[in-house]
Amino acid sequence: MDITELSQQLKKASPAPIYLVLGTQQALQQQALDLFLTLIPESERVMNVGRYDMETTPVATALDDAMSAPFFGERRLVVINKPYFLTGEKKRGKIDHDLDSFKRYLAQPEMTTTLVILAPYEKLDGRKGIVKTLKRAAVTISAAPLNEQQARQQVVGRLMGAGFQIDQAAVDELVRRTNADYGLMIANLAKLKLLAYQDKHITQAQVAALVPQSLDENVFDLVTAVLRHDQVQALDLYHQLLAGQQQPLRINAVLVGQFRLLIQLKVLSRRGLSQGNLAKQLNVHPYRVKLGLQTARRFSLLALENAYLGLIRIERALKTTQRDPALLFQLFMLQYAHQAKVAN
């Protein structure tokens, strides 16, 4: 079940006694928690909502709360966060958790309590008996990272639910500026809704004005200018990054990382790996893989390697000399253009 389905279920029917929210997308974890909080009237939350971090609190304490009757209300909400004992993760000085009691509760939950287990992990350890029992007893909500299309749909859906419209070009701009990171997209919605409060209509210009580009996105434009041997644009973008208080070593490190990724994509895509498999193998967001493949296909492996090696030389110079970073980058561009002429 995803967040949208959870929202619909909670509106139409009584909640299940146990929910497991599994996945590393923090924005989705928070959305799920917000939905569960709506089950308890705000005036009752002090007495009927309990939150317990399993890295600092024994699970027995949360279970005692879950087995208590609601205090002047119809339902209790008990939230268990970071249940590391459901994974293969080892914790130094870990809390002593009574998992037998937890199993018994899962078998016979308190029906006036909604127990929510927030598990911000990619997966649980399916070999453990407690995990098998939990998956049989709980309704599982996915909080796994969203791909680009899913992120677009969720953002548009949230805005429509709040009475806002957003242009397709505005969604495209938001995706580009956040690298399709759903958490960053959601974090910027409040500003966009505030700006468009009167007409409830979000435009591309508003997104461009309010949503800052990440360093990776700015550097991606710089990578494109380098590969096209556009010295004027490349130098202008480089100076813009310096003017934005970005450190030369940081800029160069991101450039090196971008070209390393392009080389990896170039080589691995020749072996027939799909976009999804490339994202998993390289542990890179699918949107970055999508953009990287579009770039890598337009340029030769030699061109990518020459740029990568040239940036490695800049890194060495930045660490060992006092030479002007902008001058080093300009010399790199000249040498890179000369290498291209020789190769042709």
Image (tube, rainbow, N blue to C red):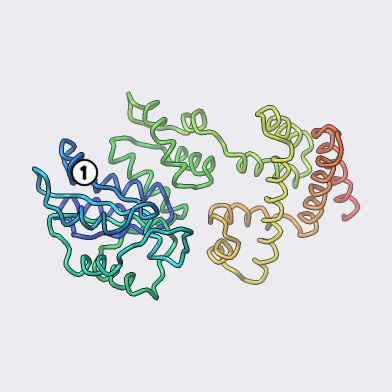
How far across and how far down the image is residue 236, in percent? 73, 31
Identify the residue at horizontal 33%, vertical 39% (top origin): 159
- Amino acid marked by disc 1: Thr
Establish if 244 lies above or below 315. above
How far across and how far down the image is residue 162, in percent? 29, 37
Local SS, label 1 = loop
Instruction: Tell me which corner region of the image, top left, top right, bottom left or bottom right, holds residue 84.
Output: bottom left
Q: For the C terminus, give its image quadrant.
A: bottom right
Q: Residue furthest right?
A: 342
Does 255 sit left or right of 285 as displayed? right
Q: For the N terminus, give its image quadrant.
A: bottom left
Q: How many marks?
A: 1
The residue carrying pointer 1 sits among few (fewer than 14), some (14 to 19) or many (20 or more) residues within 10 Å by Cα, namely: few
Q: Residue furthest top?
A: 198
How far across and how far down the image is residue 57, in percent? 34, 53
Pick the residue in front: 50 or 137.
50
Identify the residue at horizontal 34%, vertical 70% (top origin): 131
Instruction: Tell me which corner region of the image, top left, top right, bottom left or bottom right, holds residue 122.
Output: bottom left
Pick the residue in front: 27 or 153.
27
Does 8 sit left or right of 117 as displayed? left
Does 19 sit left or right of 245 as displayed? left
Pick the residue in front: 137 or 171.
137
The residue where tag 1 is placed is: 38
How far across and how far down the image is residue 219, in percent? 66, 41
Identify the residue at horizontal 13%, vertical 49% (top origin): 75
Does 88 sit left or right of 293 as displayed? left
Establish if 311 lies above or below 42. below
